[in-house]
Each structure stands twice: as C-alpha cells, then as structure tokens.
Amino acid sequence: MNEAAKKKLLQMIPHALYVLTAETDGKVAAATVSWVTQTSFKPPLIALGVKVDTHTFAVLNLSRTFVLNYLGDNQKDIAQKFFKHVEPEGNTLAGETFELSPQLKLPVFPNMAGYLECKVLEVAAHGDHATVVAEVLEAELGSADGPLKLESTGWSYGG
C-alpha cells in the first residue's frame, strides 16, 4: 500500500470537532472527538469513532448514552482542553461551565454551537477505535456559531 497516499487521503475527509460527554456510576467522561457522521434520517442516527483504550470509551460503553456538544468555529482553545481526561469541579469541566441536558441529565455547554442527546444502539470494536451507532433523542442549538472544522485548527487526526 502507498502509505503516504493513504494517510493524505484519509486526512482529507472533512471533520468537525465536538466534545462528547457521558456518565455512569458517578464517573464522568468528556473528550474531544472528530470522527462523526449522520447515517439515517428515520430514525435520526449518527455514527462516531471513539478510541477504545480511553476512559471516555469505557464510560460510554457502560452508560450507553452520551451528549455530542458542537464546538463553535472560534473554540479551538476549548477543544484542546478536552484532549486529556478531566474531572468535574462543581458545574465545570476543564473550566467550562455546563448544565445538564433535559432528557439524559448529561453535561451540555450552553456557550457552544449546540448539542445532541444520544442513545447507543450498537458498538463495533474493530481496530484502535470503536464505531458507535446512536439514535438522536434530542437536539438544541447553542449560542456559538459553528462548527469548528478540524482543517481550520492546523491539527490533523487520521491516516
């Protein structure tokens, strides 16, 4: 295989950046994710890739619910805060104030572009990331303009 071409082409797939939140048994997860796509209109389904050797995947896999918070186009600094594990401090995560979502009671960030509340339908763990298929239960727009596109950050993830 032409490794250089593979890497370049896979990195050309457009992605936005999100902060995924989940909770189970008092354990909270919050992480920046980028591999997300819509997969169905009826019911509304999305699929996302989550690294399997992470605290986030462990919590998500047990909870079977999550919130996908959409980062605004000027929130690169916030995305960076969630590259590593963070613990809640009161009503903040990584210094970002959150509220609880209406249905699932998971952290949502009102200063971001919006969020989706989701229920996991299937997890396919092949490779270093699992593919998570989830149904969208609720959606709300936030105050920021979005999305934050990976290509605009100067970062790359993929290949």
Image: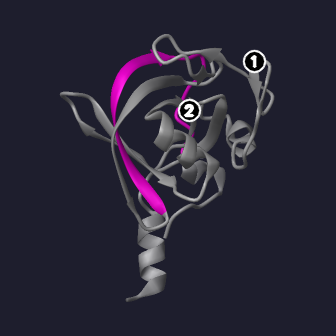
Could you give the CA–CA distance between mark 2 and mark 1, rounded to whole angstroms? 15 Å
Residue 102 on image: x %, y %: 50, 10
Q: Nearer the viewer, residue 100 or 77?
A: 100
User: What kind of residue is marked 1?
Assistant: Asn
Disc 2 target residue: 22
User: What kind of residue is marked 2?
Assistant: Ala
Q: Give the range drawn in magenta.
A: 129-149
Residue 111 on image: x %, y %: 65, 20
Residue 53 on image: x %, y %: 58, 59
Residue 45 lies in what quarter of the image?
A: top left
Residue drawn at (56%, 50%) of the image: 150
Residue 115 magenta: no
Residue 153 on image: x %, y %: 64, 50
Q: Which of 138 and 55 is in front in this view?
A: 55
Residue drawn at (35%, 26%) of the image: 136
Asked if residue 33 shows in the view, the reply is no
Residue 141 magenta: yes
Local crowd size for mark 1, using a 10 Å CA cut-off: few (<14), some (14–19), many (≥20): few
Way the structure is coloured: one colour
Residue drawn at (47%, 43%) of the image: 61
Residue furthest front in the image:
25
Q: Nearer the viewer, residue 48 or 150?
A: 48
Residue drawn at (43%, 56%) of the image: 130
- Left/right placement of residue 145 relative to residue 41 reads right
Disc 1 target residue: 91
Badge 2 marks a residue whose secondary structure is strand
